[in-house]
Image (cartoon, rainbow, N blue to C red):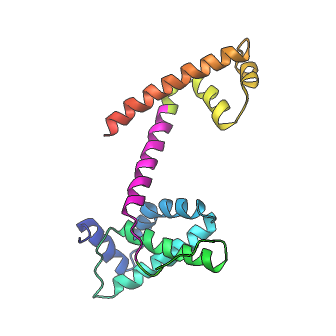
Amino acid sequence: MKSEPNEQHLLKGLAENDAKTVEILYKQNFGLIQSFITNNNGSYDDARDIFQEAMIVLYENVKNPSFILTCKISTYLYSVCRRLWLRKLQHNNRFVAHVQNLEETVPVEEDIETNDRRNTDFAIMEQSLGSLGQPCKGLLEAYYLQKKDMAEIAGSFGYTNADNAKNQKYKCLMRLKKLFFASYKNED
């Protein structure tokens, strides 16, 4: 599988050390790497360092005329970052499982597709929550994000008791669900 023409353009730009190309690659790929590393015992700074190392690996490879990328750039960068991060964890004794065949390319196509789908779902949920309106949005945020109990919510939102607040939360949740799935169907 050869990479797409747009990707070939990006690889050419990277080989020519084009700043705009580097910026595009960063914007398209860093979020996934940051998510992977922060979800696996790392920090934002770790993600930046690992991503920078992977970009250097890619840059050095595209400078080699015999280099042929046989997958998407995102897949390549994710695979390199994953190997680098697992090595670093192993070196720092923060990764307890024994990693075999670390030198081999890690199949990541499904991970990327799963992460892309999850990011799309989160975007749809955020959009649905935004169009939900008040007081529903505030009530759901108070319960699910701020972890307030129903008695607290009842007082804050002017409900007579916790049961009334709970009933309203349920109605709001059903409205949010309806908005989410209507938007979700439109995405497909």
Picture mark count: 0
Task: Say which quarter of the image contains residue 186.
Answer: top left
**Magenta span: helix, strand or loop, mainly?**
helix
Q: At 38% across and 36% down in the image, what residue appears?
A: 184
Closer to us: 46 or 117? 117
Residue 31 lies, in percent from the top left, at 50, 59
Q: Is residue 119 magenta?
A: yes
Closer to us: 102 or 12? 102
Magenta stretch: give its range. Answer: 105-128
Q: Is residue 135 visible?
A: no
Residue 41 lies, in percent from the top left, at 63, 64
Task: Say which quarter of the image contains residue 19.
Answer: bottom left
Residue 66 lies, in percent from the top left, at 27, 88
Q: Is residue 112 visible?
A: yes
Closer to us: 16 or 40? 40
Q: Is residue 124 magenta?
A: yes
Q: Relative to 92, is 123 on the left or the right?
A: left
Q: Which image quadrant: the C terminus?
A: top left
**124 relative to 149, above or below:** below
